[in-house]
Amino acid sequence: MKPTELTRRTLLATVAATTLGLGAVTVQAQSPENVLIVGQIAEPKALDPAAVTAVNDFRILMNVFDGLVRYKDGTLEVEPALATDWTISDDGTVYTFALRDGVMFHDGSGFNADAVKYNFDRMLDESHPQHGTGPFPLSFFFSAVSSVDVIDPMTVQFTLNAPYAPFLSNLAYPTGLIVSPASVEMHGSDVGRNPSGTGAFKFVEWRSNEAVVVEANPDYWDGAPELQTVVFRPITDANTRTAEMLAGGIDLMVEVPPVSLSEFQGDAFTVHEQAGPHVWFLILNAKEGPFADVRVRQAANYAINKEAIVNDVLEGTAAVAAGPTPPAFAWAYNESLEPYPYDPEKARAMIAEAGADGAELTFYVTEGGSGMLDPVAMGTAIQADLEAVGFEVTIETYEWNTFLGQVNPGLEGKADMAEMAWMTNDPDTLPFLALRTGAWPDKGGFNSGYYSNPEVDRLLEAARAATDQNERALLYQEMQTIVQEDAPWVFVANWKQNAVTSDRVGNFSLQPSFFLLLDEVTKN
């Protein structure tokens, strides 16, 4: 038996033992040296970068795949990865990338310009033979790409239909990660269960509702990782995840509930925090029902005591949001905006004026998910605040992936409001994908509340085409003012992400991108 097989058997036995004890973990588990066990918030939906949207999945993918570019450690600035350098035409529409030589996919096939073209054609070209391996929900990120051309084996060129300022940043996002064409050809629509990239870790297996296992890629172009194996375990219940961390069943826990942070004081654990571009909000159904009236949408913003949610439910781990753009994008953020104040009397008056007294609301809440903070407790507090001003609110609670399946196709005919959180890489991303008229669900976007304002559409189109950052900033700031007034969402919180590591884990840090980068992490 090979040493790696022995280690894997020991590892999986450890995982199985801790899994069986989820309800009451009392014995300190000892996972093997150089094996990191990560407590994830949910089962991944897929391991195909082009086919998923959740940060929960991205945390795995960023360790298995690379993109042409990546975010520099500790920043959202772009640096080379599978591309060593690039040039941009004077008009901002042609990007030419020189590719890194000698890189191999984990399945043994070679990385080259043909592989890059294959990935983007699969996502963007409906006539591509493997387009059916989608859907590709974030292909919006590359909607400006009119063609991808192979110049020579190690040079690839993207031609855009117009200047598009977020292009490089979007290439660094998981949607831009490069999958082995050979793996797509072999596995077809099952490629999301059989991933092959060029990253620091190779996929080993996915045991449904138990673990995704990856192991070190000794030939990684950026240096072999320190860890031998990483196990991503889905533990959807936050209290169970906390108990596992305290008992030693996992080495790294992401998205620690605010009420649990105090349990990780002392030398045995390290609590990590990192501000990032996050916003937690309520999508309001602006197409039908009470929230089709802007006065009722504004009233909901006045009715909800966001300060109490931030201070009492989230234990001060977030700030009250003032609009759709997180303040982490300092250059684009409209500092003149103030959050809607808590004013239930004003809310009641506006509801009465709109004739919405006693309106019945269906409210979708999730048990937990990427960036969702403490969604059940937050949903319960929001329900109480809305009922205090005259609404009748019925909560429907769903597991995360089921929740996304309900919300992403749109709220029409189903619900009046839904919780949501986004963590984005550019101030363009969230409003373009979730506030633009062209992003209604039937048009392929995430505007699940059907908000529409032609001036917002115009500002967003202009901002993504602007080549001057100061001009972009002014356009985004004007957009924020209009959106806050229109109130298509209830703007609730901007969060600081957190994680906890055991004292056996070294060289770990959180990233402002909210991804987990584990190639330099150690464990004794």
Image (cartoon, helix red, strand yellow):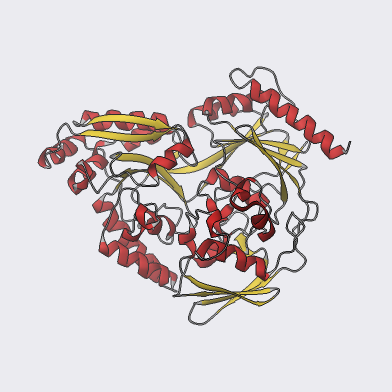
Asked if residue 275 lies left or right of residue 47, the reply is: left
Asked if residue 439 lies left or right of residue 70, the reply is: left
Identify which residue, 385 or 21, lies in the foreground.
21
Residue furthest right as drawn: 1
Asked if residue 138 lies left or right of residue 520, the reply is: left
Identify which residue, 394 or 405, lies in the foreground.
405
Instruction: Tell me what residue is drawn at x 57 percent, y 56 percent.
Output: 75
Q: In which quarter of the image is residue 435?
A: bottom left
Identify which residue, 108 or 494, lies in the foreground.
108
Asked if residue 428 is positioned above or below residue 420 in the image, the reply reads below
Q: In which quarter of the image is residue 452?
A: bottom left
Residue furthest bottom as drawn: 90
* Residue 68 position within the rendered picture, expressed as x and y whole percent measured from the top left: 63, 64
From this viewpoint, is residue 423 visible?
yes
* Residue 523 position within the rendered picture, expressed as x and y whole percent measured from the top left: 75, 38
Asked if residue 329 is positioned above or below residue 375 in the image, the reply reads below
Asked if residue 462 is positioned above or below residue 292 in the image, the reply reads below
* Residue 401 position within the rendered picture, expressed as x and y whole percent measured from the top left: 48, 39
Identify which residue, 169 or 399, lies in the foreground.
399
* Residue 302 position within the rendered picture, expressed as x and y whole percent measured from the top left: 24, 40
Asked if residue 88 lies left or right of residue 483, the reply is: right
Q: Count the labels in the image.
A: 0
